[in-house]
Amino acid sequence: MRHSLFAAASVAALLSSGSAFAQSATDIRIGDEVRGRLEESDARTRGSDAYRYDDYRVQLRAGQRLQAELRSSDFDAYLAVYAEGRTSGDPLASDDDGAGSGTSARLRFTPENDGVYIVRARPFSGLETGAYTLSLSERVAPRFPRAERISVGGRTSGRLASGDAEDEDGNTFDAFSFRAAAGERVAILLESDDFDPVLRVGRLVNGAFVKSAENDDGQGKGLNSYLVFTAGQAGEYVIQASSVGGDGEGAYTLSLEQGPPAPQARAITIGEEVSGRLNEDSASSDAGGRADLYRFSGKAGQRVAISLKADDFDSYLELFDANHNSLATDDDSGGDLNARLTFTLPEDGNYLVEARAFSDGEGRYDLKIEDVPPPPPPATVSFGQTVQGELKQNGPTDDQGRLYDAYVFTGVKDQRVQAVMRSGDFDALVQVGRMEGDAFEELASDDDGLRQGTDARLTYTLPEDGEYVLRTMPYSSSGKGLYSLEFSDRGPEPGPGSLLIGSTVRSSLTDNDALDDDGIAYDAYSFKAKADEKLRFTLISNGFDAVVEVGEDKEGDFRSLAEDDDSLSDTHARLDWTVPRDGTYVVRARSFAPNSTGDYVLIVERQPDGRNGR
C-alpha cells in the first residue's frame, strides 16, 4: 500500500507496506482525502475470488452519515465497510458504481452504534493494482419529514407522490411513528392497488433513520407488504411506507395491529433431541408461517450445533437472543431439506430457537441441540505420505455436521500440493485451508476430481509461506468409514512456454499442468505482437471441450483480455482478436470444466483474407 493523506487543515505524507496477506489498517478521519496505490505487496484475500485491498480505520458516531468515494483510472473501484475485527464476513455496506461514472464507487453508510469501522478500498474483482483517491465526508442529514402518529389498532390512508420525502437512495416515502414496549410485537400491513408496497421499520438515531426490519411481500398478502415486528427496546419507532423501486405513486392504506403472540417457548437443554409437529394449531412466526419456539441456556464462548430434520417440509432454523433479536439462520446446511447451524454464543443467558418451514408447510420434525467440543489438534502429514484413516461416530464435525479428520502441513508460496482421497464407504471430500483462531477457513476443495465417482483429488497452489490444514470428510453428513489419503508435492506452477505467430502446437493437457483459480488445467504460451495486428487462435481437441484465452501476465497475475469456447464447433474454439498495443501476451489452451484432459492442437496465426491491415 502506498498513499498520501490530505486533511482539511494540514498535509502529511504517510508511507506503509504490508505483507501479502496481513496488513494493518491506516487511521483516517472524516474530511480526509487519501491518494493511494494498490501494489503487488498489498494485502489480499484468499480463494478463487481473491482481490487486493487497502483498509482504513475510522471512528464513527451512531447515526453519523458517512460518504466514502473511491476513484481510479487503473481499476474498477469497489468500496466496503465493516465493523472493526469483523472483516472476514459480509460487509455492513458496499458499493461498486455509486459515483455514477462507471468505474468509481460511492458508499453511503449510517452506523447504528458508536464505534470503529473499517473502510476497504479494492478493485471490483481480481488482483488489479494501480492508483486511487479515497475521500471521506459527512453527509448533511436530510430533514426527516414530520411523522404522522399511528397507534396500535389504527388504520390510515395516504398517497405516495413525486414530491414526497426521499431517503438517501432517492426512494420516496411517507413516515409514521408509534411507541412500543421492549419485546412488544406489532403487525404492520401496507396495501396498495397502484404500486408494489414495501415497509421499513426503524428508529431515528441522531436524526438519521436506522432500519431494523423490512418487508416487501408478506406471506399470504400478495404484493402487499406485511411485517410482524418485535421491539428490541422501549421507545419511539418509525415506519417508512414506500414502493419497490422507490418511484411508485398512488394511494395506499396502512394499518398497525397488535402482533400475533410469539410462539410459547418450550424448554430444551443442550444435548437433548425433541420431536414436534407443525400444523394448523401451531403459532405464527414473525414471517407469518407456522413455527415452534424453544428456549435453552448457554455460556459465553460455548459453541452449539442446532439441527432440524423433517421429511414433510423444507426445514428452516433461526436463532435469537433472549430479546428476540435474530443471531443466525440456516436453510439447507443439514443436507437435503434439513437445516443445521453452528454458532458460538456471545454471552451467558437464555437463547431462543425457532423451528419452521422455509415456506408454508407442516408435518413432523426432529430438533437437536448439541455442544460442539473444541476440535482435537490436527495430525501432521508429510509430502509423499499415505495415511490410512477412519471417520468414526462421535468424532469432530464441521458446521454442516460432517465428520472429519484434520492434518497440518507447512508449505511455501507458489508450491503446488496434491491430496488424493479414496474411500469405499462414502463419497470423499477433501479441503485445504487455514485456521483463523478456532475457525477453519476453506481455501479450496474437491469432491470428484479423480473422476472415479466417489474419490477426490485436490491440486492447489499455496498463496504464501505458512501452515495449512487438510480436512478429509464425507460429502454428506451421514457418511463414515475407512479412507486413504495420499499427499504429495507437485512442484512449482509451470511457467508459460513461447511461440511465434504462425505456429502450430500439438500437445496434451495432463493432471500435472497448471490450474487456474477455478481448478481448470491449462497450458500457456507467450508471444510478441504489434498494436492493431489481427490474430486468430484456433484450439481443437477430441479429449475435452476446448477454450482458448488470450491475456497479459504481469508478475504472475494473468489478466484475461478475450476468450472463446464454441465458435468453431460445440467443442472446438476459435478466437479472432485485435492486439491493443505493442507487447508480450499469453495465450492459454484450456478445458471448459475442471478435471478434463487430453490431446489438443493450438494454431496461432494472422487472420486470413488480407484482413491483417499491415
Image: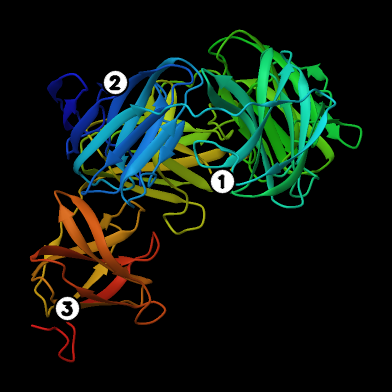
Q: Residue at 27% across / 66% down in the picture? A: 562
Name the residue beneath numbered marker 3.
Answer: 534
Name the residue beneath numbered marker 1.
Answer: 426
Lateral position of residue 326 relative to residue 415, left or right: right
Q: Nearer the viewer, residue 418 or 38?
A: 38
Q: Are marks 2 and 1 in contact (CB under 8 Å)?
A: no
Counting residues from the N terminus, which is met first, the one under dot 3 or under dot 1?
A: 1
Relative height, residue 47 to residue 202 (above, below): below
Percent x, y for residue 353? 71, 24
Lateral position of residue 406 relative to residue 77, left or right: right
The quadrant holding residue 514 is: bottom left
Counting residues from the N terminus, which is met first, the one under dot 3 or under dot 2?
A: 2
Relative height, residue 273 to residue 1 (above, below): above
Farthest-out residue, right: 281
Instruction: Indicate the quadrant containing the C terminus: top left, top right, bottom left or bottom right.
Output: bottom left
Q: Could you tell me how far apart the alpha carbons at marks 3 and 2 are, in whole angstroms?
A: 50 Å
Name the kind of residue labelled 3 in the image: Lys
Percent x, y for residue 291? 79, 31
Decide if residue 551 is in sight here: yes
Name the residue beneath numbered marker 2.
Answer: 29
Q: How crowded is mark 3: few (under 14 residues within 10 Å), some or many (20 or more)?
A: many
The image's mark for residue 441 is none
Q: For the residue labelled by badge 2, is the local secondary structure a helix, a strand or a loop?
A: loop
Relative height, residue 602 to residue 156 (above, below): below
Percent x, y for residue 479? 59, 41
Q: For the residue labelled by badge 3, is the local secondary structure a helix, a strand or a loop?
A: strand
Q: Residue at 38% across / 66% down in the picture? A: 592
Q: Could you tell me how far apart the alpha carbons at marks 2 and 1 are, in whole angstroms?
A: 55 Å
Q: Residue at 16% across / 80% down in the picture? A: 605
